[in-house]
Amino acid sequence: MNNTSKIFCALDTSDLEQAKKWASAVGPVTGALKVGMEFVNSFGPQGIEAIQNAAPNADLFIDLKFHDIPNTVAGAVRTTCANFAPAYINVHAAGGQEMLEAAKDACGNDTKLLAVTILTSLDQEAIAKVGYQNELSGQVIRMAKLAENSGLDGVVCSALEIELVRKACASNFELIVPGIRPSGSDHGDQKRVIMPSEALDKGATHLVIGRPITGANDPAKAAREILESL
């Protein structure tokens, strides 16, 4: 893997024209883009198609975090893969083994399936309020192992748990890490963050970076500078 496939730029916006501009500018630099709930709920399948047309050579991560009964999630995964053949899609590990296995069975051959462990906006106090009794890092490992045992290709996890998950799971199990903030950037609503080079050194497979790129005056330049720092 070379540097230009390590960063998925998050196109977090409800402005379709802006998203297309970011995609066409940043897609050739990073080779990978991510669309999430805000974007897809705003523009639906036509919006995803518009991004693929704006950056046809960029891998796409459709980040919708499916979490429902197994049959419903399987149907959502199957439809997404059939329509767009994204490089990655994801589900919530909290959906349980039956849901994870159904999602994997429904996944297209060209798409890798990830499980979300604990959102990077949550800290120990927050997960305790949700009802998790384990320490945050232990809960992430339990969810990662559940995803691996269910046949998934990897997880989305915080950078602070990279080394723990890397030790607990196979070497080819992929770790996609959001909450990445280059030096000097605003942490925003992320509680558990880390710098790009450090995350890769710890064993991350891919990084998800949004605002430090899309919020820059020149997003392509910002993406290129982050890649050069790796």
Image (cartoon, grey):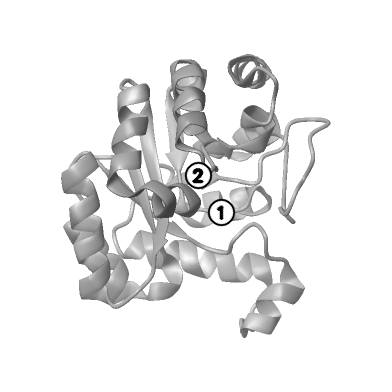
- Badge 1: few (under 14), some or many (20 or more) residues near its Cα, within 10 Å? many
Dividing the picture into quadrants, the one containing residue 218 is: top right
Q: Report if the CB atoms under discs 2 and 1 are less than 8 Å apart.
A: yes
> Disc 1 marks which amino acid?
Cys
Q: Residue 59 placed where, x, y %? A: 36, 30
Residue at image coords 19%, 54%: 79
Residue 24 image position (x, y, % from top left): 44, 20
Q: Is residue 90 visible?
A: yes
The image shows residue 152 at horizontal and vertical percentages of 32, 56
Task: Work out whether mark 2 precedes mark 1 in sequence or the reverse, and give the earlier one.
Answer: 1
> Helix or strand or loop: what does disc 2 sit on?
strand
Residue at disc 1, secondary structure: loop
Distance from disc 2 to disc 1, alpha carbons, whole Å, reads 6 Å
User: Residue at the location (44% across, 16% down)?
Assistant: 28
Give the numbered dot on residue 84: none
In the rendered image of this protein, does residue 215 appear above or below residue 86?
Answer: above
Q: Amino acid at mark 2?
A: Ile
Residue in the picture at 26% in, 43% down? 111
Q: Nearer the viewer, residue 101 or 170?
A: 101
Figure quadrant of residue 54: top left
x, y percentage for residue 170? 42, 49
Q: Which residue is mark 1?
A: 157
Which mark, by number, is residue 176? 2
Residue 55 visible within the image = no
Q: How many marks?
A: 2
Residue at horizontal 67 percent and vertical 16 percent from the top: 225
Q: Is residue 221 left or right of residue 107?
A: right
Quadrant occupied by the C terminus: top right
Question: Label 2 neighbourhood size at 10 Å, few (<14), some (14-19), many (20+)?
Answer: many
